[in-house]
Amino acid sequence: MKYILILCFILFVPGISAQQILDEYIAMGLESNLALKQKESRYKLSLEVLREARGMFYPSLSVDARYTVSEGGRVIEFPVGDLLNPVYSTLNQLTASNSFPQLENQEIMFLRPTEQETRLRMVQPVLNTDVYYNAKIKQELVVTEETGIGQYKRELTYEIKNAYYNVGMTGSLLNMLKDTRLLLLENIRVNTSLFENNKITRDVLLRSQTELSRLDQQLQLAIKNRQVATAYFNFLLNRPLSDSIIVEAPFVSKMPENTRDFFTKLAIESREEIRNLENYSNISDLSTKMYRSSVLPSVFFLADYGFQGEQYEFTKEQDYMQASLVLTWDLFSGFQNRSRIKQSLVQKEMIEQKLSETKGQIELQVITVMSELNATEAAILAAEDQAKSAREGFRLVSRKYGEGQASLVEFLDARSAMTQAEASLIVLRYTHLSNLAEFDKTISGYQPQ
Protein backbone atom coordinates (compact mmCIF):
# COMPACT_ATOMS: atom_id res chain seq x y z
CA MET A 1 0.00 0.00 0.00
CA LYS A 2 2.86 2.35 0.84
CA TYR A 3 4.46 1.91 -2.60
CA ILE A 4 1.12 2.42 -4.32
CA LEU A 5 0.68 5.79 -2.54
CA ILE A 6 4.22 6.85 -3.49
CA LEU A 7 3.55 5.90 -7.13
CA CYS A 8 0.30 7.88 -7.17
CA PHE A 9 2.09 10.89 -5.72
CA ILE A 10 4.83 10.72 -8.36
CA LEU A 11 2.26 10.51 -11.15
CA PHE A 12 0.16 13.35 -9.74
CA VAL A 13 2.93 15.88 -8.96
CA PRO A 14 3.84 16.78 -12.58
CA GLY A 15 0.26 17.81 -13.27
CA ILE A 16 0.17 19.93 -10.12
CA SER A 17 3.53 21.53 -10.94
CA ALA A 18 2.52 22.30 -14.51
CA GLN A 19 -0.81 23.73 -13.35
CA GLN A 20 0.99 25.92 -10.82
CA ILE A 21 3.29 27.24 -13.54
CA LEU A 22 0.33 28.00 -15.78
CA ASP A 23 -1.54 29.65 -12.87
CA GLU A 24 1.48 31.88 -12.26
CA TYR A 25 1.53 32.90 -15.91
CA ILE A 26 -2.20 33.63 -15.77
CA ALA A 27 -1.74 35.78 -12.66
CA MET A 28 1.11 37.60 -14.40
CA GLY A 29 -1.04 38.22 -17.46
CA LEU A 30 -4.00 39.50 -15.44
CA GLU A 31 -1.69 41.85 -13.57
CA SER A 32 0.21 43.28 -16.52
CA ASN A 33 -2.24 43.19 -19.43
CA LEU A 34 -2.70 46.74 -20.73
CA ALA A 35 -6.24 46.24 -22.07
CA LEU A 36 -7.33 44.94 -18.66
CA LYS A 37 -5.75 47.96 -16.97
CA GLN A 38 -7.78 50.22 -19.24
CA LYS A 39 -10.98 48.44 -18.24
CA GLU A 40 -10.06 48.76 -14.57
CA SER A 41 -9.48 52.49 -15.11
CA ARG A 42 -12.93 52.76 -16.69
CA TYR A 43 -14.37 50.99 -13.65
CA LYS A 44 -12.67 53.49 -11.33
CA LEU A 45 -14.04 56.30 -13.50
CA SER A 46 -17.58 54.90 -13.20
CA LEU A 47 -17.19 54.83 -9.40
CA GLU A 48 -16.32 58.52 -9.41
CA VAL A 49 -19.28 59.26 -11.69
CA LEU A 50 -21.51 57.44 -9.19
CA ARG A 51 -20.09 59.50 -6.32
CA GLU A 52 -20.79 62.63 -8.36
CA ALA A 53 -24.40 61.55 -8.91
CA ARG A 54 -24.88 60.78 -5.21
CA GLY A 55 -23.39 64.15 -4.33
CA MET A 56 -26.39 65.82 -5.96
CA PHE A 57 -28.50 64.74 -2.97
CA TYR A 58 -26.47 67.00 -0.69
CA PRO A 59 -26.83 70.78 -0.49
CA SER A 60 -24.57 72.96 -2.59
CA LEU A 61 -22.88 75.94 -0.99
CA SER A 62 -21.40 78.82 -2.97
CA VAL A 63 -20.08 82.34 -2.45
CA ASP A 64 -21.01 85.12 -4.89
CA ALA A 65 -19.34 88.52 -4.75
CA ARG A 66 -20.04 91.55 -6.95
CA TYR A 67 -18.61 95.07 -6.93
CA THR A 68 -20.03 97.52 -9.51
CA VAL A 69 -18.93 100.97 -10.65
CA SER A 70 -21.56 102.83 -12.72
CA GLU A 71 -21.83 106.12 -14.57
CA GLY A 72 -24.78 107.53 -16.50
CA GLY A 73 -27.89 105.56 -17.14
CA ARG A 74 -31.49 106.36 -16.30
CA VAL A 75 -32.39 109.17 -13.89
CA ILE A 76 -35.42 109.24 -11.60
CA GLU A 77 -36.75 112.82 -11.21
CA PHE A 78 -38.46 113.47 -7.89
CA PRO A 79 -40.20 116.95 -7.80
CA VAL A 80 -39.92 117.43 -4.07
CA GLY A 81 -39.50 121.23 -4.49
CA ASP A 82 -42.58 121.65 -6.65
CA LEU A 83 -44.57 119.66 -4.11
CA LEU A 84 -43.41 121.19 -0.85
CA ASN A 85 -42.26 124.73 -1.66
CA PRO A 86 -45.85 126.22 -1.91
CA VAL A 87 -46.67 124.63 1.41
CA TYR A 88 -43.47 125.93 2.99
CA SER A 89 -44.14 129.46 1.65
CA THR A 90 -47.62 129.45 3.22
CA LEU A 91 -46.23 128.25 6.54
CA ASN A 92 -43.53 130.97 6.50
CA GLN A 93 -46.25 133.60 5.92
CA LEU A 94 -48.42 132.27 8.71
CA THR A 95 -45.53 132.12 11.17
CA ALA A 96 -43.91 135.35 9.91
CA SER A 97 -40.57 133.51 9.75
CA ASN A 98 -38.28 131.67 7.41
CA SER A 99 -38.35 128.40 9.31
CA PHE A 100 -39.29 126.40 6.19
CA PRO A 101 -36.62 126.80 3.51
CA GLN A 102 -37.25 126.30 -0.17
CA LEU A 103 -36.28 122.86 -1.59
CA GLU A 104 -34.79 121.93 -4.95
CA ASN A 105 -36.24 119.21 -7.14
CA GLN A 106 -34.18 115.99 -6.82
CA GLU A 107 -32.66 113.79 -9.54
CA ILE A 108 -31.81 110.27 -8.37
CA MET A 109 -29.48 108.11 -10.50
CA PHE A 110 -31.00 104.67 -11.19
CA LEU A 111 -27.51 103.12 -11.09
CA ARG A 112 -25.58 103.90 -7.95
CA PRO A 113 -21.98 105.07 -8.62
CA THR A 114 -20.60 102.20 -6.53
CA GLU A 115 -22.32 99.08 -5.26
CA GLN A 116 -21.27 95.77 -3.77
CA GLU A 117 -23.06 92.53 -2.89
CA THR A 118 -21.43 89.53 -1.25
CA ARG A 119 -23.53 86.53 -0.32
CA LEU A 120 -23.35 82.91 0.77
CA ARG A 121 -25.95 80.76 -1.03
CA MET A 122 -27.15 77.27 -0.14
CA VAL A 123 -29.34 75.19 -2.48
CA GLN A 124 -30.87 71.94 -1.23
CA PRO A 125 -32.97 69.67 -3.50
CA VAL A 126 -36.18 68.73 -1.73
CA LEU A 127 -38.00 66.88 -4.50
CA ASN A 128 -36.16 66.00 -7.72
CA THR A 129 -36.85 62.63 -9.36
CA ASP A 130 -34.11 63.18 -11.95
CA VAL A 131 -31.46 63.21 -9.21
CA TYR A 132 -32.82 60.00 -7.67
CA TYR A 133 -33.04 57.97 -10.87
CA ASN A 134 -29.78 59.36 -12.22
CA ALA A 135 -27.96 57.96 -9.17
CA LYS A 136 -29.69 54.58 -9.64
CA ILE A 137 -28.67 54.46 -13.31
CA LYS A 138 -25.05 55.33 -12.49
CA GLN A 139 -25.02 52.53 -9.91
CA GLU A 140 -26.13 50.02 -12.53
CA LEU A 141 -23.43 51.30 -14.88
CA VAL A 142 -20.82 50.67 -12.18
CA VAL A 143 -22.01 47.07 -11.91
CA THR A 144 -21.84 46.80 -15.71
CA GLU A 145 -18.22 48.00 -15.77
CA GLU A 146 -17.30 45.59 -12.98
CA THR A 147 -18.96 42.72 -14.83
CA GLY A 148 -17.08 43.72 -17.98
CA ILE A 149 -13.80 43.35 -16.11
CA GLY A 150 -14.80 39.85 -15.03
CA GLN A 151 -15.72 38.94 -18.60
CA TYR A 152 -12.41 40.22 -19.97
CA LYS A 153 -10.48 38.34 -17.28
CA ARG A 154 -12.26 35.15 -18.28
CA GLU A 155 -11.48 35.74 -21.95
CA LEU A 156 -7.87 36.67 -21.20
CA THR A 157 -7.42 33.59 -19.01
CA TYR A 158 -8.60 31.43 -21.89
CA GLU A 159 -6.29 33.20 -24.34
CA ILE A 160 -3.30 32.71 -22.02
CA LYS A 161 -4.12 29.02 -21.53
CA ASN A 162 -4.61 28.48 -25.24
CA ALA A 163 -1.38 30.33 -26.08
CA TYR A 164 0.50 28.34 -23.42
CA TYR A 165 -0.76 25.05 -24.84
CA ASN A 166 0.16 26.24 -28.33
CA VAL A 167 3.70 26.92 -27.11
CA GLY A 168 3.80 23.44 -25.59
CA MET A 169 2.44 21.82 -28.76
CA THR A 170 4.88 23.57 -31.10
CA GLY A 171 7.74 22.78 -28.73
CA SER A 172 6.78 19.09 -28.53
CA LEU A 173 6.49 18.85 -32.30
CA LEU A 174 9.86 20.53 -32.67
CA ASN A 175 11.50 18.13 -30.23
CA MET A 176 9.87 15.17 -31.96
CA LEU A 177 11.23 16.32 -35.33
CA LYS A 178 14.69 16.79 -33.84
CA ASP A 179 14.61 13.23 -32.53
CA THR A 180 13.45 12.02 -35.93
CA ARG A 181 16.32 13.89 -37.56
CA LEU A 182 18.76 11.94 -35.41
CA LEU A 183 17.22 8.73 -36.74
CA LEU A 184 17.65 9.91 -40.32
CA LEU A 185 21.23 10.97 -39.67
CA GLU A 186 21.95 7.53 -38.29
CA ASN A 187 20.29 6.01 -41.35
CA ILE A 188 22.47 8.13 -43.64
CA ARG A 189 25.57 7.10 -41.71
CA VAL A 190 24.69 3.43 -42.07
CA ASN A 191 23.83 3.80 -45.76
CA THR A 192 27.04 5.69 -46.42
CA SER A 193 29.02 2.86 -44.88
CA LEU A 194 27.07 0.30 -46.91
CA PHE A 195 27.57 2.29 -50.11
CA GLU A 196 31.30 2.58 -49.53
CA ASN A 197 31.42 -1.20 -49.09
CA ASN A 198 29.42 -1.69 -52.33
CA LYS A 199 26.47 -3.29 -50.53
CA ILE A 200 23.86 -0.76 -51.74
CA THR A 201 23.55 1.45 -54.79
CA ARG A 202 23.91 5.22 -54.79
CA ASP A 203 20.20 5.86 -55.27
CA VAL A 204 19.48 4.36 -51.84
CA LEU A 205 21.87 6.83 -50.21
CA LEU A 206 20.42 9.71 -52.20
CA ARG A 207 16.91 8.73 -51.09
CA SER A 208 18.02 8.90 -47.44
CA GLN A 209 19.55 12.34 -47.97
CA THR A 210 16.39 13.53 -49.75
CA GLU A 211 14.29 12.36 -46.80
CA LEU A 212 16.57 14.33 -44.46
CA SER A 213 16.18 17.49 -46.58
CA ARG A 214 12.41 17.08 -46.52
CA LEU A 215 12.48 16.73 -42.74
CA ASP A 216 14.69 19.83 -42.44
CA GLN A 217 11.98 21.82 -44.22
CA GLN A 218 9.43 20.59 -41.69
CA LEU A 219 11.90 21.42 -38.93
CA GLN A 220 12.28 25.03 -40.09
CA LEU A 221 8.50 25.42 -40.23
CA ALA A 222 8.26 24.00 -36.70
CA ILE A 223 10.92 26.46 -35.48
CA LYS A 224 8.95 29.34 -37.01
CA ASN A 225 5.72 28.15 -35.40
CA ARG A 226 7.44 27.86 -32.04
CA GLN A 227 8.82 31.41 -32.31
CA VAL A 228 5.42 32.85 -33.28
CA ALA A 229 3.67 30.98 -30.45
CA THR A 230 6.28 32.20 -27.94
CA ALA A 231 5.97 35.80 -29.13
CA TYR A 232 2.17 35.77 -28.88
CA PHE A 233 2.23 34.26 -25.40
CA ASN A 234 4.70 36.91 -24.19
CA PHE A 235 2.57 39.59 -25.86
CA LEU A 236 -0.43 38.53 -23.77
CA LEU A 237 1.73 38.80 -20.64
CA ASN A 238 3.14 42.20 -21.72
CA ARG A 239 6.69 40.82 -21.68
CA PRO A 240 9.53 41.03 -24.22
CA LEU A 241 8.43 38.84 -27.10
CA SER A 242 11.56 36.70 -27.05
CA ASP A 243 11.49 35.83 -23.33
CA SER A 244 11.85 32.16 -22.52
CA ILE A 245 8.82 30.20 -21.32
CA ILE A 246 8.76 27.37 -18.83
CA VAL A 247 6.67 24.63 -20.40
CA GLU A 248 5.81 21.51 -18.47
CA ALA A 249 3.68 18.63 -19.64
CA PRO A 250 0.31 19.59 -18.14
CA PHE A 251 -2.10 17.23 -16.50
CA VAL A 252 -4.76 16.15 -19.01
CA SER A 253 -8.04 15.78 -17.17
CA LYS A 254 -11.29 14.41 -18.55
CA MET A 255 -14.49 16.31 -19.04
CA PRO A 256 -16.70 16.43 -15.93
CA GLU A 257 -19.45 13.83 -15.95
CA ASN A 258 -22.43 16.14 -15.56
CA THR A 259 -25.28 16.47 -18.02
CA ARG A 260 -25.47 19.06 -20.78
CA ASP A 261 -28.54 20.65 -19.20
CA PHE A 262 -26.62 21.11 -15.95
CA PHE A 263 -23.75 22.93 -17.65
CA THR A 264 -26.10 25.00 -19.80
CA LYS A 265 -27.98 26.22 -16.73
CA LEU A 266 -24.69 26.88 -14.92
CA ALA A 267 -23.31 28.86 -17.85
CA ILE A 268 -26.43 31.02 -18.21
CA GLU A 269 -26.43 31.75 -14.47
CA SER A 270 -22.74 32.67 -14.30
CA ARG A 271 -21.86 34.29 -17.63
CA GLU A 272 -21.12 38.00 -17.51
CA GLU A 273 -22.91 38.64 -20.81
CA ILE A 274 -26.22 37.65 -19.22
CA ARG A 275 -25.61 39.84 -16.16
CA ASN A 276 -24.65 42.76 -18.37
CA LEU A 277 -27.84 42.49 -20.40
CA GLU A 278 -29.87 42.22 -17.19
CA ASN A 279 -28.17 45.40 -15.93
CA TYR A 280 -28.99 47.20 -19.16
CA SER A 281 -32.57 46.01 -18.80
CA ASN A 282 -32.64 47.53 -15.31
CA ILE A 283 -31.22 50.77 -16.69
CA SER A 284 -33.96 50.86 -19.31
CA ASP A 285 -36.60 50.38 -16.59
CA LEU A 286 -35.07 53.17 -14.50
CA SER A 287 -34.98 55.49 -17.53
CA THR A 288 -38.67 54.81 -18.17
CA LYS A 289 -39.54 55.59 -14.55
CA MET A 290 -37.45 58.77 -14.65
CA TYR A 291 -39.21 60.06 -17.78
CA ARG A 292 -42.64 59.19 -16.40
CA SER A 293 -41.90 60.94 -13.12
CA SER A 294 -41.05 64.15 -14.96
CA VAL A 295 -44.72 65.12 -14.64
CA LEU A 296 -43.95 65.85 -10.98
CA PRO A 297 -42.59 69.25 -9.99
CA SER A 298 -39.08 69.86 -8.70
CA VAL A 299 -38.74 71.61 -5.37
CA PHE A 300 -35.59 73.29 -4.05
CA PHE A 301 -34.84 75.12 -0.81
CA LEU A 302 -32.67 78.18 -1.27
CA ALA A 303 -31.10 80.34 1.46
CA ASP A 304 -28.91 83.46 1.11
CA TYR A 305 -26.92 85.37 3.67
CA GLY A 306 -24.86 88.38 2.58
CA PHE A 307 -24.03 92.06 2.60
CA GLN A 308 -25.13 94.91 0.34
CA GLY A 309 -24.00 98.51 0.19
CA GLU A 310 -22.07 101.17 -1.65
CA GLN A 311 -18.80 100.36 0.14
CA TYR A 312 -17.10 97.09 0.95
CA GLU A 313 -18.15 96.97 4.55
CA PHE A 314 -19.47 93.98 6.49
CA THR A 315 -21.57 95.49 9.22
CA LYS A 316 -24.91 94.63 10.76
CA GLU A 317 -26.48 97.56 8.92
CA GLN A 318 -25.54 96.01 5.55
CA ASP A 319 -26.18 92.30 6.12
CA TYR A 320 -29.33 90.54 4.99
CA MET A 321 -30.77 87.01 5.00
CA GLN A 322 -33.26 85.50 2.58
CA ALA A 323 -34.84 82.03 2.30
CA SER A 324 -36.95 80.69 -0.54
CA LEU A 325 -38.77 77.54 -1.50
CA VAL A 326 -38.55 77.26 -5.29
CA LEU A 327 -40.88 75.08 -7.36
CA THR A 328 -40.40 74.38 -11.05
CA TRP A 329 -42.96 72.44 -13.05
CA ASP A 330 -42.70 71.64 -16.75
CA LEU A 331 -46.29 71.66 -17.96
CA PHE A 332 -45.64 71.13 -21.65
CA SER A 333 -42.49 70.32 -23.64
CA GLY A 334 -43.75 69.50 -27.10
CA PHE A 335 -44.39 65.78 -26.36
CA GLN A 336 -40.64 65.25 -26.01
CA ASN A 337 -41.01 63.30 -22.80
CA ARG A 338 -43.58 60.99 -24.38
CA SER A 339 -41.07 60.16 -27.11
CA ARG A 340 -38.36 59.48 -24.51
CA ILE A 341 -40.65 57.00 -22.74
CA LYS A 342 -41.37 55.18 -25.99
CA GLN A 343 -37.66 55.06 -26.81
CA SER A 344 -36.82 53.48 -23.46
CA LEU A 345 -39.60 50.91 -23.93
CA VAL A 346 -38.26 50.00 -27.37
CA GLN A 347 -34.76 49.69 -25.91
CA LYS A 348 -36.15 47.39 -23.22
CA GLU A 349 -37.73 45.21 -25.91
CA MET A 350 -34.45 45.08 -27.87
CA ILE A 351 -32.51 44.09 -24.74
CA GLU A 352 -34.97 41.29 -23.98
CA GLN A 353 -34.56 39.99 -27.52
CA LYS A 354 -30.78 40.16 -27.23
CA LEU A 355 -30.97 38.36 -23.88
CA SER A 356 -32.94 35.51 -25.42
CA GLU A 357 -30.50 35.33 -28.33
CA THR A 358 -27.48 35.26 -26.00
CA LYS A 359 -28.95 32.42 -23.95
CA GLY A 360 -29.37 30.43 -27.15
CA GLN A 361 -25.79 31.19 -28.18
CA ILE A 362 -24.48 30.05 -24.80
CA GLU A 363 -26.45 26.81 -25.05
CA LEU A 364 -24.97 26.24 -28.52
CA GLN A 365 -21.47 26.93 -27.17
CA VAL A 366 -21.96 24.35 -24.40
CA ILE A 367 -23.15 21.73 -26.88
CA THR A 368 -20.26 22.46 -29.26
CA VAL A 369 -17.48 22.40 -26.68
CA MET A 370 -18.81 19.26 -24.99
CA SER A 371 -18.99 17.53 -28.37
CA GLU A 372 -15.42 18.61 -29.12
CA LEU A 373 -14.24 17.24 -25.77
CA ASN A 374 -15.95 13.90 -26.32
CA ALA A 375 -14.46 13.68 -29.81
CA THR A 376 -10.90 14.51 -28.70
CA GLU A 377 -11.05 12.12 -25.76
CA ALA A 378 -12.00 9.27 -28.09
CA ALA A 379 -9.45 10.42 -30.67
CA ILE A 380 -6.64 10.48 -28.09
CA LEU A 381 -7.30 6.86 -27.12
CA ALA A 382 -7.16 5.83 -30.77
CA ALA A 383 -4.06 7.98 -31.38
CA GLU A 384 -2.26 6.44 -28.41
CA ASP A 385 -2.87 2.94 -29.79
CA GLN A 386 -1.80 4.10 -33.24
CA ALA A 387 1.39 5.72 -31.90
CA LYS A 388 2.20 2.61 -29.86
CA SER A 389 1.74 0.40 -32.90
CA ALA A 390 3.75 2.75 -35.12
CA ARG A 391 6.65 2.84 -32.66
CA GLU A 392 6.67 -0.95 -32.40
CA GLY A 393 6.39 -1.26 -36.19
CA PHE A 394 9.32 1.10 -36.71
CA ARG A 395 11.38 -0.81 -34.16
CA LEU A 396 10.79 -4.10 -35.99
CA VAL A 397 11.40 -2.62 -39.46
CA SER A 398 14.50 -0.81 -38.21
CA ARG A 399 15.92 -4.06 -36.87
CA LYS A 400 15.13 -5.87 -40.10
CA TYR A 401 16.68 -3.05 -42.10
CA GLY A 402 19.85 -3.30 -40.03
CA GLU A 403 19.93 -7.03 -40.78
CA GLY A 404 19.34 -6.44 -44.48
CA GLN A 405 15.88 -8.03 -44.43
CA ALA A 406 13.92 -4.84 -45.17
CA SER A 407 14.25 -2.23 -47.88
CA LEU A 408 14.89 1.48 -47.41
CA VAL A 409 11.37 2.21 -48.62
CA GLU A 410 9.95 0.06 -45.82
CA PHE A 411 12.24 1.78 -43.33
CA LEU A 412 11.23 5.27 -44.46
CA ASP A 413 7.53 4.35 -44.56
CA ALA A 414 7.72 3.01 -41.01
CA ARG A 415 9.58 6.10 -39.89
CA SER A 416 7.04 8.39 -41.60
CA ALA A 417 4.13 6.48 -40.05
CA MET A 418 5.70 6.76 -36.60
CA THR A 419 6.38 10.50 -37.05
CA GLN A 420 2.83 11.16 -38.21
CA ALA A 421 1.37 9.09 -35.37
CA GLU A 422 3.50 10.92 -32.78
CA ALA A 423 2.62 14.31 -34.25
CA SER A 424 -1.08 13.43 -34.34
CA LEU A 425 -0.98 12.36 -30.68
CA ILE A 426 0.80 15.57 -29.64
CA VAL A 427 -1.69 17.74 -31.53
CA LEU A 428 -4.69 15.86 -30.14
CA ARG A 429 -3.47 16.09 -26.54
CA TYR A 430 -2.91 19.83 -26.72
CA THR A 431 -6.12 20.32 -28.67
CA HIS A 432 -7.92 18.52 -25.86
CA LEU A 433 -6.28 20.87 -23.34
CA SER A 434 -7.38 23.88 -25.41
CA ASN A 435 -10.91 22.44 -25.54
CA LEU A 436 -10.88 22.04 -21.77
CA ALA A 437 -9.79 25.69 -21.47
CA GLU A 438 -12.64 26.71 -23.77
CA PHE A 439 -15.03 24.58 -21.74
CA ASP A 440 -13.87 26.37 -18.58
CA LYS A 441 -14.39 29.72 -20.32
CA THR A 442 -17.83 28.71 -21.58
CA ILE A 443 -19.00 27.53 -18.17
CA SER A 444 -17.35 30.61 -16.62
CA GLY A 445 -14.85 28.94 -14.35
CA TYR A 446 -16.65 25.72 -13.37
CA GLN A 447 -14.94 23.91 -10.55
CA PRO A 448 -16.04 20.29 -10.00
CA GLN A 449 -17.05 19.46 -6.44
Image (spheres, rainbow, N blue to C red):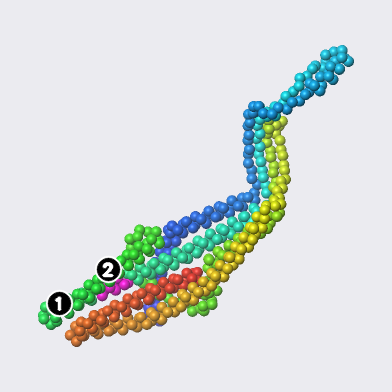
| Viewer-nearest residue: 241 or 356 | 356
Residue 178 forms part of the magenta stretch: yes
Q: Is residue 30 left or right of residue 304?
A: left
Range drawn in magenta: 172-180
Q: Is residue 382 left or right of residue 185?
A: right
Is disc 1 placed on a helix, strand or loop? helix
Is disc 2 placed on a helix, strand or loop? helix
Question: Residue reaching furthest front?
Answer: 334
Type of amino acid under label 1? Thr
Position of residue 73 relative to residue 441, above or below, is above
Residue 437 forms part of the magenta stretch: no
Provide residue 368's location: percent of width, then percent of height: 47, 75
Residue at the spot x=44%, y=73% of the render?
A: 436
Could you tell me if residue 315 is visible in this image?
no
Provide residue 248's location: percent of width, then percent of height: 36, 70
Q: Quadrant of residue 319?
A: top right
Q: Which residue is mark 1?
A: 192
Q: Is residue 102 left or right of residue 290?
A: right
| Viewer-nearest residue: 208 or 153 | 208
Question: Residue reaching furthest top?
Answer: 96
Residue at the spot x=27%, y=79% of the render?
A: 416
Position of residue 71 relative to residue 6, above or below, is above
Type of amino acid under label 2? Gln
Provide residue 225's location: percent of width, then percent of height: 32, 67
Position of residue 393 relative to residue 301, above or below, is below
| Viewer-nearest residue: 346 or 259 | 346
Could you tell me if residue 365 is visible in this image?
yes
Q: Quadrant of residue 306?
A: top right
Q: Which residue is mark 2?
A: 220
Within 10 Å of disc 1 (Cα), the crowding (few <14, some 14-19, many 20+) is some
Residue at the spot x=37%, y=78% of the render?
A: 7
